[in-house]
Amino acid sequence: MSGYNFAYLDEQTKRMIRRAILKALAIPGYQVPFASREMPMPYGWGTGGVQVSAAVLTPEDRFKVIDQGADDTTNAVSIRRFFERTAGIATTTATRDATVIQTRHRIPEEPLREGQILVYQVPIPEPLRFLEPRESETRKMHSLAEYGLMHVKLYEDISRHGHIATTYAYPVKVEERYVMDPSPIPKFDNPKLSDCAAIQLFGAGREQRIYALPPYTTVASLDFDDHPFDPSRADHPCGLCGSVETYLDEVIMDDAGGRMFVCSDTDHCETRQNAGYRGKDAG
Amino acid sequence: MRTENLSGGFTDPSVQSAHAFRAVMEAMARPGTIHDIAGAEPPAPLSRAAGAVLLTLCDTETPVHLAGATDCDAVRTWLAFHTGAPLSGPSHCMLAVGEWGALAPLSSYPVGTSEYPDRSATLIVECAELAASGATLRGPGIRETARLSLPDTEAFRTNRAHFPLGLDFIFTSGSQLAALPRTTEVS
Ligand SMILES: [Zn+2]
């Protein structure tokens, strides 16, 4: 590890990120600006999440990285190796053994506990961006809690499709104050954001924003009285572990176009299979 | 400048500040919980906990207000040597440190603006002791309720009423700390 700063970033940068994290925890759902640094990986690889992880990790941590539920994608493996090399920390794929989990696009199925930290990689932190491209305007809308446009957009979905069509990055309201982008997790995961025992931190590198949810924070998915929020789930059990409660990916099994539905959270699915649960496609 | 003021910093800054930050973050994320924090040996009257918080969060970009007895040569020299933080009055500080009475009035500190509520001061309040008793706390970070020995209740209620603007507090005593963000309801 000699020749590196612990967890790559220099101390001054970590201090700046740490100060931003504390203010983010004090104002849940509000996006704190920070001076994002160049990281030795492309922006699409979660440089915001990596910087937040670098600011919170200690040598005693056990670190897990998931990419769309899986621990073994190129992105997840390279981020895990990056911290093994620069922070000398232990890594794991088991959700229950991890103290810090960096994620792209999923919340683990297993309920998180006190003492754990979930770090989200965020591409676009501003939930109002697609309605209003000007930062000065979205900042004003947040300051006035003026979220009518967002409701209009969701209601247009209902008139057009009969339901709210947004399935990823479904906007939430935090403690009845700030509207927040939960990062591109499936809306199936939205209920897990609320009243979570772990600390949730969100880092957007290119857009230079950090925001946070302290444990046991109330997070409500935006909806309407006559169209309540529906987390929705594919109507199948997992082909490998038989779970009827998890978020599923549809995978192609063979050249003949055979398909099966399997848990997107590979650690959760393997843990269930090891405990003896079997789905109809399990060998 | 006396050399004793140059000791008492982190001996392994990267790792000690990582540990110290986790204690501060856990405290701020879970109002009312009390955490150990180590690594700093600041000059009197600063507690070890207050010293560690300053070393972890301060640098040349963070104006610090030293209130009351903390505004002494020994502390000024120690803080300048280890952090380079400029000193300021309460109205322009990012962090302030001192006993509760010396930090008053709270209306002197920046509470942020409606567009940038994060541009607000964090007050490090030196306390005789910290205990999980006294005021009842509710809000984000707290499952149902928590208890914490606080130097006041009305001041924190007033602070809460201005959310999302407001001050955030870190309470230090010996080698322990707790915190109270602006979201916490105190009764
Ligand atoms: Zn499964």
Image: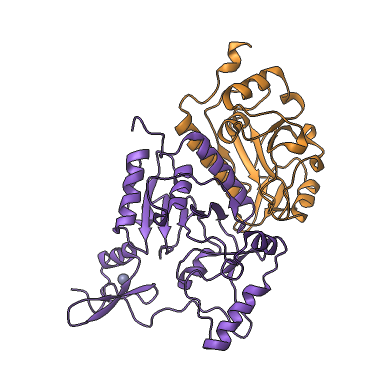
The answer to whether residue A169 is above or below residue A236 is: above
Q: Colour of chain A?
A: purple
Could you tell me if residue A200 is visible in this image?
no
Ligand 1: which quarter?
bottom left
User: Residue, x 39% and y 80% (percent of image)?
Assistant: A234
Decide if residue B120 is on the left or right side of residue A264.
right
**Displayed quadrant of residue A43:** bottom left
Query: Looking at the image, which is closer to me, A183 or B43?
Result: A183
How many callouts does the rendering have?
0
Q: Quick one: quadrant of the N terminus of chain A? A: top left
Residue B68: percent from left, percent from top: 77, 27
Between A268 and A190, the one nearer to me in the picture = A190
Name the residue nearer the viewer: A148 or A274.
A148
Rendered location of residue A75, percent (x, y): 33, 56
- Residue B93 % position (x, y): 71, 36
Q: Which residue is drawn at 29% across and 72% down?
A: A241
Q: Residue at x 64, y 54 (%)?
A: A27
Residue farthest top in this picture: B2
Relative to A110, residue A58 above or below: above
Vertical arrangement, residue B79 with respect to residue B18, above or below? above
Instruction: Report the chain shown in orange.
Output: B
**Taking A14 as reference, is A67 left or right?**
left
Please indicate, yes or no, whether residue A256 appears anywhere in the rendered image.
yes
Q: Report the quarter where the C terminus of chain A lies.
A: bottom left
Q: Is residue A26 left or right of residue B26?
A: right
Q: In this view, does A194 lie above or below A41?
A: below
Residue A8 at what x, y percent from top left? 41, 39
Left or right position of A59 against B86: left
Which residue reaches farthest front?
A134
- The residue located at (55%, 64%) in the rendering is A181
